[in-house]
Amino acid sequence: MHSDSPVVIPDDEGTYFYQPNEYTPTQSAGFLMRRVLSSILQQADAQLEVHGLTYVQWLPLYKLLLCADTTNAQLAKDLGMDPASVTRALDRIEAKGLLRRERSTSDRRVVHLVLTDEGRRIAAEVPRVLSRVLNCHLAGFSHDECRAMVSMLQRMIINGEAMRSSPSDDAPMRPDTDCLVHPAPHQS
C-alpha cells in the first residue's frame, strides 16, 4: 500500500460498526438521515407554503440571495441538482415575479439570474423558517450535542467526497483499504 492510500481504523472492538449480517434499515445512518431530511423539508415547505413555494423552489431562491451573480448551470452545480430541474424551478419562480433572467452584455450566451425585490424579501425569510424547523427537530439536544452532530455530519461528507475521488473508483469498494478515516477534531 503506498502512502497516499486511504486507511481504515476499525472501532474499539476491532470490527466495523455496520456488519452485513446485522444490518437493518432502522439502524442505518443513511436511512435515518434521509427520514430526518424528509421531515425537515416537509415542515419547511409547510412554513413557506404561504408564498406558494416548495423546497425545489425556495432552495434556489435562497441560494440566489447568497450568491447574487450566478447562472443556471452554476446554480445547478452548487445545489447538486440537475440543470433541467433547476430550469423548471426557476421558470416557476420567475412566473411568480420573484426572479428575472438578464442576458449578459459581454456574452449573449450567458443568462444571469437576478432576484426581484419581492424575491429577495421572501428569500430572506428562509433562514428564519429553517432555524425554527431545525430547532424544533433538535428539541431536547444540548448545544454540545448539536455541535458534535454537525461535526460528525461534516466528517461523513468529507469521507464521502474522498470515496468519490478515490483512484479505485472503477473497482468494488473494499472497507479495509478504501475508506479514508477523518478523526474527530481535537477538543481542548
Image: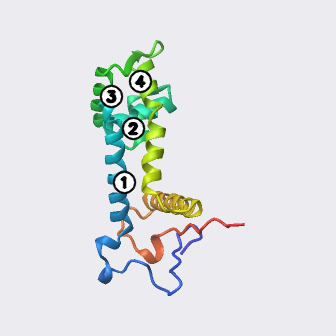
- Please tell me whether mark 2 or mark 4 is closer to you in this view: 4
The residue positioned 55% from the left and 60% from the top of the image is 151
Q: Which numbered dot is residue 37?
A: 1
Q: Circle 4 sits on which residue?
A: 119
103 or 6: which is nearer to us?
A: 103
User: Does residue 146 lie above or below 45 as drawn?
Assistant: below
Q: Circle 2 sits on which residue?
A: 59
- Please tell me whether mark 1 or mark 3 is closer to you in this view: 1
Q: Which numbered dot is residue 90?
A: 3
Q: Position of residue 163 (x, y in %)?
A: 44, 62
User: Does residue 186 lie above or below 121 as drawn?
Assistant: below
Query: Looking at the picture, which amino acid does disc 3 mark?
Result: Leu
Query: Looking at the picture, which amino acid does disc 2 mark?
Result: Leu
Of callouts 2 and 1, the N-terminal one: 1
Mark 1 and mark 3: Cα distance apart in space: 23 Å
Of callouts 3 and 4, the N-terminal one: 3
In the rendered image, the residue lying farthest to the right is: 188
- Please tell me whether mark 3 or mark 4 is closer to you in this view: 4
User: What kind of colouring is applied to the model shown?
Assistant: rainbow
Q: Position of residue 172 (x, y in %)?
A: 35, 69
Q: On the image, which quarter does residue 84 sit in? A: top left
Q: Position of residue 137 (x, y in %)?
A: 42, 55
Quick check: marks 3 and 2 in contact, CB under 8 Å? no
The residue positioned 32% from the left and 32% from the top of the image is 50
Query: Looking at the picture, which amino acid does disc 1 mark?
Result: Leu
